[in-house]
Image (spheres, rainbow, N blue to C red):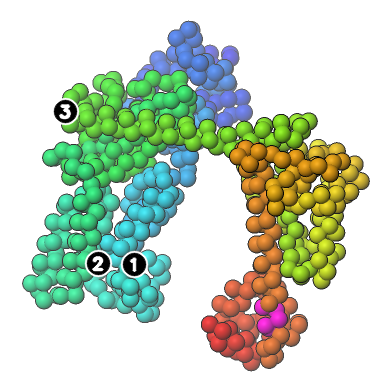
Amino acid sequence: MDILQEKLKILPEKSGVYLMKDAKGKIIYVGKARMLKNRVRQYFQSNKNHSAKVKAMVAKIADFETIITENELEALILECNLIKKHRPRYNISLKDDKSYPYLKLTLNEEFPRIILTRHVIHDGSRYFGPYTSGISVKETLSLLKKIFPLRTCKIFAKRPCLEYHIKRCLAPCVKKISRENYMDFVKSAEKFLEGRTLQVEKEISAQMESAAENLQFEQAARLRDTLLAVKKVTEKQKIVTETGDADAIGLARLENETCAQIFFIRDGKVTGRENFLLSGAADESNSQVITEFIKQYYSRAQISASEILLPVNLSENELKILAEWLKVKIFEPKRGVKRSLVEMANQNAEKFLSEEFSREQLKNAQTIGAVAELQRFLSLPKLPRRMECFDISHIQGAETVASMVVFENGIPDKNSYRRFKIRSTEGKPDDFLSMREVTARRYEKISAENMPDLIVIDGGIGQLNSALEIIRSAGHKVPVVGLAKQFELIFVENSSIPIEIPKNSAALKLLQRIRDEAHRFAITYHRKLRRTRNLKSELDNIAGIGEKRRSELFKTFRTIGKIKSATVEELAAVPSMTRSAAESLKKFFDAQE
């Protein structure tokens, strides 16, 4: 604390940014101040008026750093960048903001494209977003491709592709359209993404008439189709006001969750909305939450509105700095249509939070709640947080495989999944022997600390006893159960009478999900091996492809698809292959297609 006290004495009387650090030097909070000396000292004075969050943060501060700026606006911009970079624990932040998708208009290319991305790079492109729903942004991208047939390929081809023939691309690669006409479509797409659909309609209509007057009937027809598509979208948008473009922000709180919602109004119509959950906002005031949300959101999004409508009032200084930064008018409307827009955003934010809360409750009931219920039904000594389930898959003993899937607290842990190629029963089906082999390979050399809380076997009493023989001989006392599919009965150790769990219980549904996932994972592996085996048998019928060459082909290309897509030159470059053998192989696959 002595170091902190010394630093507090020499704080500058200037605007800037301060970074609070813990004992490990990790940045835990970033803030800005009009005067660093006064703002930073407040944290280390009497904590009677501090919130629980600030008290917890101050207790962890081991050091701090300040960066002086010319003015408060520069401090605001620097603060936004540092929060985005370091994601400090005690700052309010958009949840999962690293994974938010954007639509990218590649204006840095001669013939721009519209693509989906999750990374914003300052490369001359224009980014639209962030979007909170991956599904909705993909639907938007699909709609844009139908309305504005911009190119989708990364590299120009030598001839028009299928996209051109189905009227989804203007084929600039083979000069089917001039760059000038192509850029008209790009500008329309850009304004469409901004939500200015009425302006887009007027411009496309004027371009269509001009093309018709100049006898450019093909271009006029393209523009006519685009105009009809834009009008179809515009008809669905709700008219709310006669003039102005605005972003109306709503705010809602429920339990410890906070949601901000933005309504986008362009050309007097609601063109879209986005919901954002905020972390670290539980102890903050509404005005502080809105201030931080504006910083977080608009540091990532390119604003195209002339006004931002707020649900709460901010301090005069904060409004001035934010307005200067974003170059828009920011205020809390008190009455009229604009106030109605904010209220509508508030109500929708409340609805979204309520639905999220219900979804979270249902998720908990199906996961950790189901795990607790399963413990009661099976009288397990402890909560089965980690469960491992095994399944066997084969066809008449051929390509016998086993799968192991893992669920942690009722949720699949796919990184822990394992698959096994069974060696002991090849050519002769024996599920019991297969189960003994896979459990032996999994549990004979594992320590007690790494054992799961429950082992589930897909099958009846026979499969269960086969697994128990190995697991118990290895010295493990973990509960093991078998789930028989026909009547969904649970078999347990030392009992011939199965347990029947209620059909509508979350516990049984959890067991069924685990069993079905194990079956899916096993049969996927089995099919892969069978396809490989079938291809190998097909390769036996090709002149010049023997066992050695077949082996080298799989060693080089690893997958069937890569062998099929390889060129003659690539095939001939494989060790032991010749030009004539490569040509025979290529002809064989071409004939199949």
1 vs 3, front mark: 3
Magenta stretch: helix, strand or loop mostly: helix
Mark 1 or mark 3: whose residue is earlier in sequence? 1
Q: Is residue 474 above or below residue 83?
A: below
Instruction: Please give the name of the residue rendered at 62% of the width and 86% of the height, measured from the top-left corner.
Output: 585
Q: Is residue 361 above or below residue 131?
A: above
Using the rendered view, name the quadrant where residue 177 is placed.
bottom left
Instruction: Please give the name of the residue rendered at 17% of the width and 45% of the height, measured from the top-left corner.
Output: 267
Residue type of the residue flagged with mark 3: Gly
Work out how far the residue at label 3 is from the one at label 2, CA to CA, in angstroms.
42 Å
- Front position in the image: 170 or 350: 350
Work out how far the residue at label 1 is from the one at label 2, CA to CA, in angstroms.
10 Å
Which range is magenta?
A: 535-539
Using the rendered view, name the quadrant where residue 344 is placed.
top left
Q: Position of residue 75 (x, y in %)?
A: 36, 30
For disc 3, the marked residue is 336
For disc 2, the marked residue is 182
Residue type of the residue flagged with mark 2: Tyr
For disc 1, the marked residue is 151
- Front position in the image: 85 or 521: 521
Q: Position of residue 325 (x, y in %)?
A: 28, 34
Residue type of the residue flagged with mark 1: Arg
- Direction from residue 191 to residue 116 in the image, left or right: right
User: Which quadrant does the N terminus fall into?
Assistant: top right
Using the rendered view, name the quadrant where residue 317 is placed.
top left
